Image: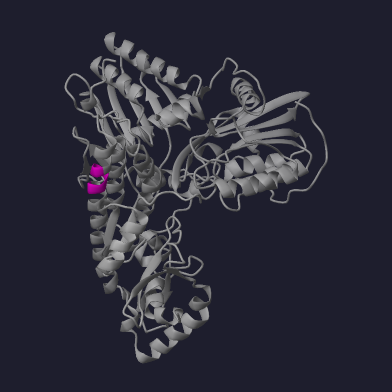
Amino acid sequence: MKYAKYEYYLNRELSWLKFNERVLAESMDKNSPLMERLKFIAITSSNLDEFFMIRVGTLKTQNEETQEILDDAGLSTAVQLSAIADAAHKLVKLQYQSLSRILEHLEKHNVSFIGAEELSSKEQIWLKDYFQTVIFPVLTPLAVDASHPFPFLANRSLNLGITLTGSDKKISISVVQVPTVLPRLVETPSNGKKRRFLFLEDIIEQYAHQLFYERKRGRAVRLEIGRKGNSELKKFLIDELMIGENDLYQIQGPLDLTYLFKFADYTGFESLRLSTISPHPPKDLGGVEDLFAAIRERDILLHHPYESFNPVVDFVQSAAIDPNVLAIKQTLYRVSGNSPIVQALAQAAENGKQVTVVVEILARFDEENNILWARRLEEAGCHVIYGLVGLKTHAKMCLIVRREGGGIKRYVHMSTGNYNDSTAKIYTDIGLFTANDQFGADASGFFNVLTGYSDPPVWNKIVVAPVGLRQRLYELIDQEISCARQGKPAHIIAKMNALLDKDIVAKLYEASSAGVDIDLIVRGICVLRPGMPGVSDRIKVRSIVGRFLEHSRIFYFANGGDAKCYLSSADWMPRNLIRRVELFFPVENDEHIERLKDILDMMLADNQKSHIMKNDGTYRHQKTTNPAFSVQDELYRRSNESVTRPDLKIPRILPVTKHSGEL
């Protein structure tokens, strides 16, 4: 392989940690409201937890194997673990430094976190009563001694390690888990304009003496411990959990900063938060009363969260009550807790329609939730399919089959993001409605492959992983190479969440060497190294981290002047290309292509939330004020200007009407 040298690639784990550094950097932006800055500290903490549970856990298991494995950057597992530890410790230190500065500013707004010892005598009486009536009944102290082995500590749990000294001076250990069923922060009774908060674990520690009158388990990969913890307890935990010093994080402050998610949304702090953004009706649906008629007339593009997700919900809800709708077929990967789409699918089945739902049970961390609503759909009469063996179904598609004019008409929605009305408010994603017959035929074929034993058809429009996506990407890149060699416009702009596939990276290096200009907008992991002379000197990489999580996957190819644009559910990672069912589909309306290109151009012009990757894999925060330009702010401003009428409304009463219909 021509581009196989180790120095051509960056390590994926260290690239991910650099992404988390960019997230944390948002907490240090003095121009952002304080509560918004706290949210980015919480996001950093949550990201780090997931990273250690999944990626570091895998590496530690791999490190125990006898065969040495080098990654694409030439790093052994042991070297990776050491580098991860160094980077993660520095990140955590920065995290708490940022938190400390924000808390100092909150003090000026009469908001403070205090210890129990700072309460007045009257407040101590209140606290004691709160402990005895609210906290004490749900606590379970777990002794550790000859007859009580060290207890199982659940992932992401917060625990107090307590040393007990007996009358014989012998020291024993007990563990008390801080209950998650109670609020982590406890606000003291009103004290004028000041608002003061106690941590639940501090209250438990204050009254710990009253406690003592006498998932498949995985290996521990990271342990946070307060710096005030004593050395005996520290040594005991290291021995019992069988972790190294690098796996221990001694924290100067409260443990588990994900509590800041809830605190940042406390009422009464509106002046310390950004104003709420209300999604607007989609530009393509201005003046529309009949959604199906609008889709028949032309393809419709939706850009969330700037434009409302309601039309996607309405699409399914209106189909559920429409007597002309015969069938609904949909993929579901992650949905909200009380999903209106799931409710509409269930109602559609109860109304006698053929409803088929392809559910991904193994959506990470959503397994239990997905099983529960899948059972609800089965009970309602839906055909629930649990995907293909060995492959995750990550594609986003909904097909509605409707009886019209003596025949049938197929309506299709495809998207870069999940059918989740909650995350649609904070994730940037793009969806497409179409009644194009070729897309409709592809959609029917797609679901037939997922629900039966049909061989993949020859697709008209879409490309489906794992069968053909990698080859299609090669073809598109090769076309740009050909254009460059002929002196025609050759430019690739690719926006995604992660770029990890070594072969795709090598193909991009080939294109750069041939004269193709390449702009990559990669939010998270990127193992490609830009700016290498003769290899990647035409490639630029940037990451945008802002108020909304950049989740959309958009791919633009100049194609010699006849531009092509695609949307996809897939990132350029091995898992998306070979281990998942993914969709890659073209946007063909000229106005839509121009709109997507404009979005990409604005991202390349962003000088507020952009981080530019340097040749060594580090990032430079590009922030200027002459003039300042934020792509997320501009897109919201534009969506606000395009509002012409209230959002499309569909009746929410879903009557049961029994009828039958065959495809």
Q: Is residue 99 shown above or below 530?
A: below
In the rendered image, residue 351 lying in the magenta stretch gets the answer: no
Q: Which of the 4 quarters of the picture holds residue 390?
A: top right
Magenta-highlighted residues: 82-86
Q: Which of the 4 quarters of the picture holds residue 210?
A: bottom left
Report the front residue among 178 and 481: 178
User: Which of the image's four quarters has the C terminus?
Assistant: top right
Majority secondary structure in the magenta region: helix
Where is residue 111 shown, x and y percent of the image? 33, 74
Relative to 636, is 327 on the left or the right? right
Q: Is residue 606 visible in this depiction of the protein? A: no
Q: Which colour scheme is used?
A: one colour
Q: Is residue 515 shown above or below 121?
A: above
User: Which of the image's four quarters has the N terminus?
Assistant: top left
Q: Residue at x 68, y 46 (%)?
A: 375
Given the current orientation, which residue lies at the most extreme bottom position? 121
Given the current orientation, which residue lies at the most extreme left position? 533
Report the front residue among 308 and 617: 617
Q: Is residue 212 visible in this depiction of the protein? A: yes
Relative to 294, is 241 on the left or the right? left
Q: Is residue 104 shown above or below 83?
A: below
Where is residue 519 shown, x and y percent of the image? 29, 28
Q: Which residue is drawn at 38% across and 37% down?
A: 497
Where is residue 122 shown, x and y percent of the image? 39, 91
